[in-house]
Amino acid sequence: MKTINDAFSRGCTSLTTITCLAKTPPALTLSSFPFIVKVIYVPAVSVETYKATSSFWSRYADKITAMP
């Protein structure tokens, strides 16, 4: 997956957790995830990359954490 756009979560009213397995953050659009998302799990080696990526991932930096 190279891009996650707003169609990804359109109509989702209870999506609170997202797991992204990609080591390289896919591109996001401004409204890719609903505001109700509490946690975004990513590979441990990529946490800081996701948080620093300017393609809107940094907007969710406080929710990004390593996969359990």
Image (cartoon, rainbow, N blue to C red):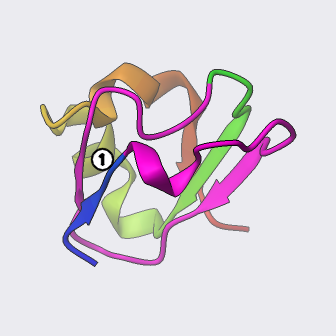
- Is 16 positioned to the left or the right of 46 in the image? right
Which SS class for mark 1? Answer: helix
Is-magenta flag for residue 27?
Answer: yes
Q: Residue at x 41, y 43 (%)?
A: 6
Total marks placed: 1
Quadrant housing the N terminus:
bottom left
Q: Residue at x 30, y 27 (%)?
A: 30
Query: Which SS type dominates the magenta stretch?
Result: loop
Dividing the picture into quadrants, the one containing residue 24 is bottom left
Please, is residue 10 above or below residue 37 in the view?
below
**Residue lying furthest right in this view?**
14
Q: Which residues are magenta?
A: 6-34
Q: Answer few, some or many: residues within 10 Å of disc 1's Cα (few below 14, many 20 plus, some between 14 and 19).
A: many
Dividing the picture into quadrants, the one containing residue 13 is top right
Q: Compare residues 23 and 11 and report the one nearer the observer.
A: 11
Residue occupied by mark 1: 50
Q: Position of residue 12 (x, y in %)?
A: 74, 44
Please, is residue 62 above or below residue 1 in the view?
above
Q: Compare residues 47 and 31 and report the one nearer the observer.
A: 31
Quadrant housing the C terminus:
bottom right
Q: Residue at x 59, y 32 (%)?
A: 63
Q: Position of residue 17 (x, y in %)?
A: 74, 50
Please, is residue 2 above or below residue 38 in the view?
below
Amino acid on which disc 1 is placed = Tyr
Q: Residue at x 69, y 34 (%)?
A: 37
Q: Position of residue 40 (x, y in %)?
A: 59, 48
Q: Position of residue 60 (x, y in %)?
A: 45, 27
Q: Compare residues 20 and 5 and report the one nearer the observer.
A: 5
